[in-house]
Amino acid sequence: MKMTKLDNVGLVTPDAIGRGAVSFDEAAIQSVGHRPG
């Protein structure tokens, strides 16, 4: 059975998504020098 892109997305856990969001947020903070808002 061939795995589609959608199937691969289904393997991503909320925890992994949360870590990705935090990493992205930290990178954004460092790029602007402070937390937006």
Image: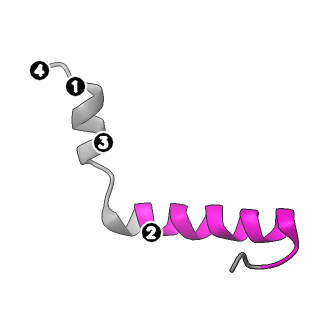
Q: Is residue 1 left or right of residue 7?
A: left
Q: Which mark is residue 1?
A: 4
Query: What residue sits right under mark 1 in the picture?
Result: 3
Color encoding of the figure: one colour
Q: Do the CB atoms of the residues marked 4 and 3 lie less than 8 Å apart?
A: no
Q: Callout 4 environment at 10 Å: few (<14), some (14 to 19), or many (20+)? A: few
Marks 1 and 4 close (CB-CB < 8 Å)? yes
User: Is label 2 or label 1 in front?
Assistant: 2
Residue that sits furthest to the top in the current view: 2
Q: Which residue is mark 3?
A: 9
Instruction: Residue 29 in the image: state x and y as whole percent.
Output: 77, 71
Secondary structure of the residue carrying numbered label 2: helix
Which residue position is annotated with label 2? 18
Q: Earlier in the sequence, mark 2 or mark 1?
A: 1
Q: Secondary structure at mark 4?
A: loop
* Label 3–label 1 contact, CB within 8 A: no
Callout in the foreground (4, 2)? 2
Separation (CA) of disc 4 from disc 3 = 16 Å
The answer for how far apart the CA atoms under marks 2 and 1 are is: 24 Å
Could you tell me the amino acid type at mark 1? Met
